[in-house]
Amino acid sequence: QVQLVESGGGLVQAGGSLRLSCAASGRTFSSYDMGWFRQAPGNEREFVAAINWSGSSTVYADSVKGRFTISRDNAKNTVFLQMNSLKPEDTAVYSCATRGSLGYKNGYWGQGTQVTVSS
């Protein structure tokens, strides 16, 4: 069992930055690939970024490539999402998740943190 708690969301002006954190409980955190997802009102949840268990490999959605950076600190059981050059269209609830045997759908999910970017 893994519990995930996101933090770091808030209100920021366009062009600003935020750093999201996802703290995990459980001794097996370092064995999981991790992902960040977001969901805006009326939209489907969408993939943002992912990182493998060791932190040696990352992947990003085209919409955030070059602006967002995913990283992890396995000693602290935490995964981060550094978000720079934020745009109003980045406004959403951001959630982290572990990758399960069938992908993220059957992984563990946090409750999410709200990010609002004003124009």
Image (cartoon, rainbow, N blue to C red):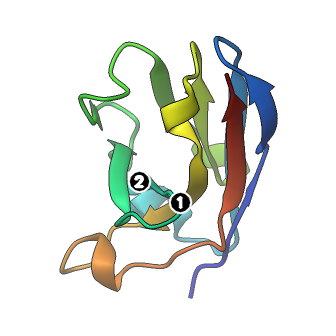
Q: Quadrant of the N terminus?
A: bottom right
For residue 84, side relative to residue 59 (left or right): right
Q: Secondary structure at mark 1?
A: strand
Residue that label 1 marks: 96
Question: In front here: 63 or 81?
Answer: 63
For residue 25, side relative to residue 58 (left or right): right
Q: Quadrant of residue 100?
A: bottom left
The residue shown at (42%, 55%) is 34
Residue that label 2 marks: 35
Residue type of the residue flagged with mark 1: Cys
For residue 59, side relative to residue 6 (left or right): left
The residue shown at (27%, 36%) is 61
Q: Quadrant of residue 81?
A: top right
The residue shown at (71%, 54%) is 114
Residue 69 location (% of width, % of height): 48, 24
Question: In front here: 57 or 92?
Answer: 92
Residue 76 location (% of width, % of height): 72, 48
Residue 1 versus residue 93 in the image, above or below: below
Q: Secondary structure at mark 2?
A: strand
The residue shown at (38%, 44%) is 48
Mark closest to the chain's N terminus, 2 or 1? 2
Q: Rate crowding at label 1 as few (under 14), some (14 to 19) or many (20 or more) other CA atoms within 10 Å.
A: many
Residue 28 versus residue 54 in the image, above or below: below
Asked if marks 2 and 1 touch (Cβ < 8 Å), the reply is yes
Residue 2 visible, this orientation: yes
